[in-house]
Image: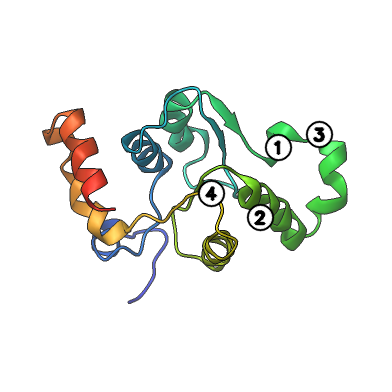
Amino acid sequence: MARNPVNSNPGPARRQGRCPLTPEEVGLILRSHGYGKEVHIYVASGEVYGGEETLAPLKAMFPNFYSKDTIASKEELEPFSAFSSRMAALDFIVCDESDVFVTNNNGNMAKILAGRRRYFGHKPTIRPNAKKLYRVFLNRNNMALEGYYRRNQELY
């Protein structure tokens, strides 16, 4: 499949589960699992596609929202910031120690974290199946919120 970042149509790729979930979709999954506004959310990533506008729905659902940049000062991050692998290592440590880990993709870091958490038998890991969730997210505006949450939970 040819990739054209300027004129791409994410529809076919989303149907096949090849696009990461949006921050809003991750928030909806957390809500469907019973997590409320009081939960603290740490987003482990570099720049989020769409920036603050894309993150706004997740932040509205979970106001206790954090990232490397909000929990550490620029001075604290400076020794790491020139090295993407070191920045990723910080995210890895926070995610590994978290009470619940939710991934929005099936990248290497997510796979390693899920395997490590499973091996050590601790804390829940939620790895949504984007291909199965595509139709649920596509139809979420046509169903009541409770029906959406119930349908989402059936996929786990």
Q: Amino acid at mark 1?
A: Asp
Q: Earlier in the sequence, mark 4 or mark 3?
A: 3
- Label 4 to label 3: alpha-carbon separation: 28 Å
Q: Is residue 124 rendered to the left or right of residue 137?
A: right
Q: Is residue 155 left or right of residue 76?
A: left
The percent position of residue 45, horizontal first and vertical second, equals: 59, 50
Q: Is residue 117 above or below residue 100?
A: below
- Disc 1 to disc 4: CB gap under 8 Å: no
Report which residue position mark 3 lands on: 73
Give the spatial CA distance, label 1 vs label 3: 7 Å
Disc 1, SS: helix
Identity, as a three-letter code, of the amino acid under mark 2: Phe
* First-in-chain label (1 vs 2): 1
Residue 12, position as x, y percentages in the image: 24, 63
- Comes first in the chain, label 2 or label 3: 3
- Mark found first going from the N terminus, 1 or 4: 1
Q: Quadrant of the N terminus?
A: bottom left
Q: How packed is label 4: few (under 14 Cα within 10 Å), some, or many (20 or more)? A: few
Mark 1 and mark 2: span between their CA atoms?
15 Å
Q: Is residue 93 left or right of residue 127?
A: right
Residue 92, label in figure? 2
User: Which residue position is annotated with label 1?
Assistant: 69
Q: Secondary structure at mark 2?
A: helix
Residue lying at 48% horizontally and 28% vertically, measured from the top left: 59
State the residue at coordinates (45%, 64%).
Answer: 106
Q: Nearer the viewer, mark 4 or mark 2?
A: 4
